[in-house]
Image (cartoon, rainbow, N blue to C red):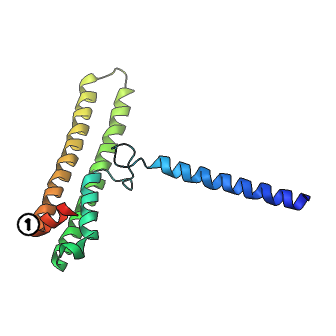
């Protein structure tokens, strides 16, 4: 076997090894429906977004009207905007908590107040997602909800 043939075979082997490694890395990055490491496009509230995406994807099968589609898209936009706003407030509170933790003398009451505010916002965010999910059901008719359950 000549030197060029040997180098060609080695290059092919390295290429195959890189492809296999990349495939395995991708497979491990998404673990499926076991509730761990799911890909949700970086969004919290995956259940709401997945439900809404499923409804919009199946709009023809469900027989959604143009008005229903517009209402669902508007709902998604509003929920995303609310989540961005709440996430910003939560991040700001995290900064306040970190800063208060480094103060001397340390004031436990103020840190606890920031923590309470932070988790109140987290609670509010979760409740808004539940409410938004309920709004999806309010937009759809009973027949469309039944069709959605079977799909």
Give coordinates of residue 129: x percent, y percent. 20, 52
Give coordinates of residue 17: x percent, y percent. 67, 51
Residue at left 17%, top 56%? Answer: 133
Which corner quadrant holds the N terminus? bottom right
> Where is residue 121, by image quadrant?
top left
Q: Residues within 10 Å of mark 1 (few under 14, many from 20)?
A: few
**Outermost residue to the top:** 105
> Where is residue 107, by image quadrant?
top left
103 to 27, vertically: above or below: above
Which corner quadrant holds the C terminus? bottom left
Residue at left 79%, top 57%? Answer: 9
Tally of numbered tags = 1
Residue at left 17%, top 51%? Answer: 130
| Residue 141 seen by the camera | no
Residue 19 vs residue 71, the one in the foreground: 19
Residue 89 vs residue 146, the one in the foreground: 146
Give coordinates of residue 149: x percent, y percent. 17, 60
Q: Is residue 26 left or right of residue 92?
A: right
> Where is residue 36, by image quadrant?
top left
Q: Is residue 131 left or right of residue 48?
A: left
| Residue 54 seen by the camera | yes
Would you name the residue on which mark 1 appears? 142
**Outermost residue to the right:** 2
Dot 1 lies on which element? helix
**Outermost residue to the front:** 1
**Outermost residue to the left:** 142
Residue 131 vs residue 36, the one in the foreground: 36
102 to 149, vertically: above or below: above
């Amino acid at each position: 076997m000549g030197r060029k043939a040997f180098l060609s075979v080695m290059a092919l082997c390295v290429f195959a090894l890189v492809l296999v490694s990349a495939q395995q890395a991708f497979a491990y990055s998404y673990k499926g429906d076991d509730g761990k490491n799911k890909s949700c496009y970086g969004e919290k509230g995956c259940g709401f977004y997945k439900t809404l995406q499923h409804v919009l994807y199946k709009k023809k099968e469900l027989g959604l009207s143009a008005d229903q589609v517009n209402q669902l898209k508007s709902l998604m936009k509003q929920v995303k905007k609310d989540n961005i706003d709440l996430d910003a407030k939560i991040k700001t509170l995290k900064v306040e908590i970190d800063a208060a933790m480094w103060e001397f003398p340390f004031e436990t009451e103020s840190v606890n107040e920031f923590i309470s505010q932070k988790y109140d916002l987290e609670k509010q965010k979760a409740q808004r997602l539940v409410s938004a999910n309920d709004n999806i059901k309010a937009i759809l008719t009973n027949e469309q909800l039944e069709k959605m359950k079977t799909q």
